[in-house]
């Protein structure tokens, strides 16, 4: 016969636990989100710190596990919950079902996003990413070089600068064009960007160009860039992987003009205030301004119980306060990163401290701006194009180019 007290506890204890709010089940541990930020910025640590601090204010119980992932090398892995990648792969990632559409009611301050950037991330009515940063090459000249001030296209620039005579990796003072054409993917994107200018019409390259029918006009334009820079210089990449070494050279007086991304100004110190910069066309025709996007998405393979957290994290990564903090100078960096934010409000927040952002906002707000994308076969197209286009930049290669352009590009 069982003890009466044991029987009493057997029946009463569960009732006491139920009404006291206790549970016999263990409490769930704090969640963890795996996140990969875009690595090709002047200082990724500032981005990680800004995101971590902003996230801790809203979800201190959810850990962020930062993962190193390179969108140029591989597709998103299943363990990534939230990731930032180059917009050239947007259509490919959608085609391969890597991205979870972001419901409209999960996008904070949508009207503050650069219209062309969020529109470019919207496919058939679904938003697949929220833009954080946009990026484009600018033509930099020195303010005291008034002859180059009005130049806004590659052909006119060549008419003034001409071919480089010396073929050293580092040009002499005020000699030649500084430009990085060393990367294979960069050459392919440059070809596609120039093709838009040549055709005078924007395309998202959902149908990628026929590599058996290369545009001679585009190759002629790219050859002009190489001729102004010199083959050794344009293909130079430093052993220390300093992506902004040409900005350092330009600051030191080397080269007469420089083509590079806006963030290159972060390496120019106060000299950034002594330069002019503008968008440019690859032809004498109108420039069709295209921008790469560092865009933020949620992995379609994410666990259901993490989805809402992931949507929140996407908004934190792209929020005004987060990006302002990530871009601005800090205790370890005297100068801002001079990246192009994807929100109008960020330019206004930065303008009072860094006046250059007033001009950058004007450039980023042009109504003609478009997001640069490559079709669903982006990765395959890039690899195939690498076997063809770089070789055509060799000026000894025969190509059906009008005689006057051959003279210019030789």
Image (cartoon, grey):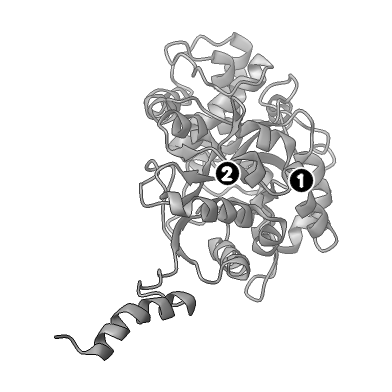
Q: Residue at x 67, y 32 (%)?
A: 119
Is residue 223 in view?
Answer: no
Residue beneath disc 1: 112
Viewer-nearest of discs 2 and 1: 1
Q: Position of residue 388 (x, y in %)?
A: 40, 22
Residue furthest left as drawn: 1
User: Quadrant where the N terminus lies?
Assistant: bottom left
Q: Nearer the viewer, residue 81 or 216?
A: 81
> Could you tell me which secondary element the residue under label 1 belongs to?
helix
Is residue 407 in view?
Answer: yes
Real-space Cα distance between discs 2 and 1? 15 Å
Mark 2–mark 1 CB contact (< 8 Å):
no
Q: Is residue 124 above or below residue 174?
A: above
Q: Nearer the viewer, residue 293 or 103?
A: 103
User: Quadrant where the C terminus lies?
Assistant: top right
Q: How would you rate the neighbour count of disc 1 (Cα within 10 Å): few for under 14, some for 14-19, many for 20 or more?
A: some
Residue beneath disc 2: 295
Q: Is residue 125 above or below residue 201?
A: below
Q: Position of residue 270 (x, y in %)?
A: 75, 63
């Amino acid at each position: 016969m069982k003890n009466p007290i044991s029987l009493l506890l057997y029946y009463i204890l569960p009732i006491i636990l139920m009404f006291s709010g206790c549970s016999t089940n263990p409490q769930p541990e704090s969640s963890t989100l795996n996140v990969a930020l875009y690595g090709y910025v002047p200082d990724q640590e500032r981005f990680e710190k800004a995101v971590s601090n902003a996230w801790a204010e809203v979800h201190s119980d959810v850990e962020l596990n930062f993962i190193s992932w390179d969108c140029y090398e591989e597709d998103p892995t299943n363990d990534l919950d939230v990731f930032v990648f180059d917009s050239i792969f947007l259509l490919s990632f959608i085609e391969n079902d890597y991205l979870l559409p972001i419901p409209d009611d999960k996008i904070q301050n949508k009207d503050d996003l650069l219209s062309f950037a969020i529109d470019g991330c919207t496919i058939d009515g679904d938003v697949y990413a929220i833009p954080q940063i946009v990026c484009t090459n600018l033509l930099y000249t020195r303010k005291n070089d008034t002859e180059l001030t009005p130049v806004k296209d590659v052909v006119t620039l060549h008419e003034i600068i001409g071919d480089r005579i010396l073929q050293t990796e580092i040009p002499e003072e005020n000699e030649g064009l500084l430009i990085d054409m060393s990367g294979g993917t960069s050459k392919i994107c440059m070809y596609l960007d120039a093709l838009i200018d040549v055709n005078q019409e924007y395309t998202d390259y959902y149908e990628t160009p026929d590599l058996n029918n290369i545009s001679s006009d585009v190759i002629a334009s790219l050859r002009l860039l190489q001729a102004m820079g010199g083959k050794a210089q344009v293909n130079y990449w430093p052993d220390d992987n300093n992506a902004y070494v040409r900005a350092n050279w330009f600051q030191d007086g080397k080269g007469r003009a420089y083509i590079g991304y806006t963030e290159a100004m972060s390496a120019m110190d106060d000299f950034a205030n002594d330069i002019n910069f503008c968008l440019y066309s690859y032809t004498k025709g109108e420039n069709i301004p295209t921008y790469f996007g560092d865009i933020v998405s949620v992995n379609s393979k994410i666990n259901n119980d993490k989805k809402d957290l992931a949507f929140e994290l996407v908004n934190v990564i792209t929020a005004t306060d987060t990006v302002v903090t990530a871009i601005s100078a800090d205790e370890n960096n005297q100068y801002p990163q001079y990246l192009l934010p994807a929100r109008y409000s960020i330019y206004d927040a930065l303008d009072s401290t860094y006046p250059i952002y007033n001009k950058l906002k004007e450039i980023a707000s042009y109504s003609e701006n478009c997001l640069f994308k490559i079709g669903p076969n982006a990765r395959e197209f890039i690899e195939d194009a690498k076997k063809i286009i770089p070789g055509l930049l060799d000026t000894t290669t025969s190509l059906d180019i009008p005689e006057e352009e051959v003279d210019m590009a030789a």
